[in-house]
Structure formats: C-alpha cells, structure tokens
Amino acid sequence: AQSVTQLGSHVSVSEGALVLLRCNYSSSVPPYLFWYVQYPNQGLQLLLKYTTGATLVKGINGFEAEFKKSETSFHLTKPSAHMSDAAEYFCAVRESGGGADGLTFGKGTHLIIQP
Amino acid sequence: NAGVMQNPRHLVRRRGQEARLRCSPMKGHSHVYWYRQLPEEGLKFMVYLQKENIIDESGMPKERFSAEFPKEGPSILRIQQVVRGDSAAYFCASSPIRDEAFFGQGTRLTVV
C-alpha cells in the first residue's frame, strides 16, 4: 500500500521568502509523484510531477521539487513567495507500472503568505 | 479545449434523496477518475473508469454509490439515499494516459 505524509497542515512565510513544503511517501514499488495546488472553491491544478529520469523537477509558477529515494521525500520549493501563492497544496503518489490506478493524496498544506 | 466540466457545482439534497453528479472529461480523454474530499482532508480515490468499463472501484463504498461512463455522454457518479456523511466535495479528473490527471472544479454536495 502507498501513503503520503505532508508535514505541517499550515505553513506561513513572508512575501519574498523561501517556500518549503514537505512531503514524504511510502510505496512498495517505484513511485510516480505529484504536487497539486488548490485555490478556494476550485479544482486541483497540477504543479509538477516526477515519473522517471531527472530527480529535480521544475513546474509551473516557479515551483520545483526533488525526488530523493533514500529519504522517500518529494519536497516542494520556491525561492521567493508571492501573495498569489497562497493556497492549499497536495502531494500525491501513484505506483508505477501496473499498480493501483488512483492517486493517493496527502492531507494537504495550507500556505499562508504574510505581506 | 475546455477543461474537465463538472455539474452542478453545488448540490443540496435532503437525507434519503438521490444525488447525481456529472463529469464531462476533456476532449480526447478516455480515462475518468472520481475522488471525494472531506473537510480538512485530502482527496480520496473512489473509482477509475474507461468508456463503458469500470476498471478500479476499490475506493467506492459498497452500498449506495455507483459510477458509469457510457459510450456517449458524461460520466455519472450516483449516490442513492444520501446521508449527512455524504456531504463532501466530489472531484472528477480525466486523462489521456494513466500518468497525468486534469481535475474539474468539483461538485459540493450538502445533505440536509
């Protein structure tokens, strides 16, 4: 079975500061990893994904994440936070190959940007 | 190319009524997924369908819930005899392949 743990249900950073949202996963097979963002009363938008290849993945809006197999982590970062980054962020995992079909999501991290 | 369309956006049902949630996938997408989001929780996988077939329903409650994706028309998630615990946001996602999913804006079901 696969699972996702997002450390910190709420993270607050100042505008212009580094954003770091933590995600750890467990999976019995090589994982596919995803970060999604959800704005209030909206659906989820894909920020970035890791399937194979380069472990540092760049996404939209200046976000990036690094897959670290030894740490079973896929933390999301952005060098400089903008007010528009305030939203809920979800990390998700899916088994590669012929594994389970659905994504397994973490509980989410609410990102607050202080002016 | 329009995104994944879900309707209605908000649905209020009394206990015991039926709820029908519709999802039109993006053009060219033959894979549809349904997820449920409870307050303060992440999304939970419910069911995965391809045209006319249920591929994986491991996340669906055993009773009252059903899903279909007919050859023509949208995918339907049907909840019979709704109870207060069914109140949640229900999201549909579609994809052309298994590795990426595009989400709709969700249907927020409130059972009163």
Image: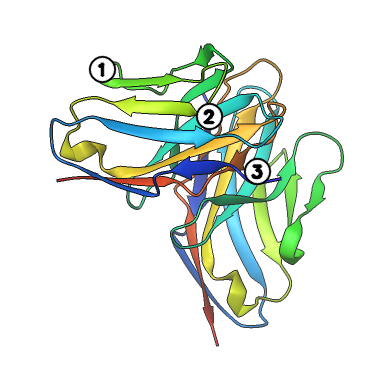
Residue at (47% x, 59% y) in the render: A8
Way the structure is coloured: rainbow
What's under tag 3, amino acid-wise? Phe
User: Circle 3 — which element?
Assistant: strand
Answer with the quarter of the image where residue B83 lies.
top left
Q: Which amino acid, mark 2? A: Tyr
Give the residue number, with chain letter if any, for mark 1. B63
Question: On the image, numbered disc 2 is attached to which residue?
Answer: B33
Q: Is residue A115 left or right of residue A31?
A: left
Q: Earlier in the sequence, mark 1 or mark 2?
A: 2
Residue A104 appears anywhere in the view:
no
Mark 1 residue crowding within 10 angstroms, few (<14) / some (14–19) / many (20+): few
Q: Residue A104: image x %, image y %?
A: 52, 34
Label 2 chain ID: B
Front: mark 2 or 3: 2
Q: Residue at x 59, y 79 (%)?
A: A83
Chain letter of disc 1? B
In the shown orientation, is residue B20 left or right of residue A75? left
> Which disc is residue A34 wearing?
3
Q: Secondary structure at mark 1?
A: loop
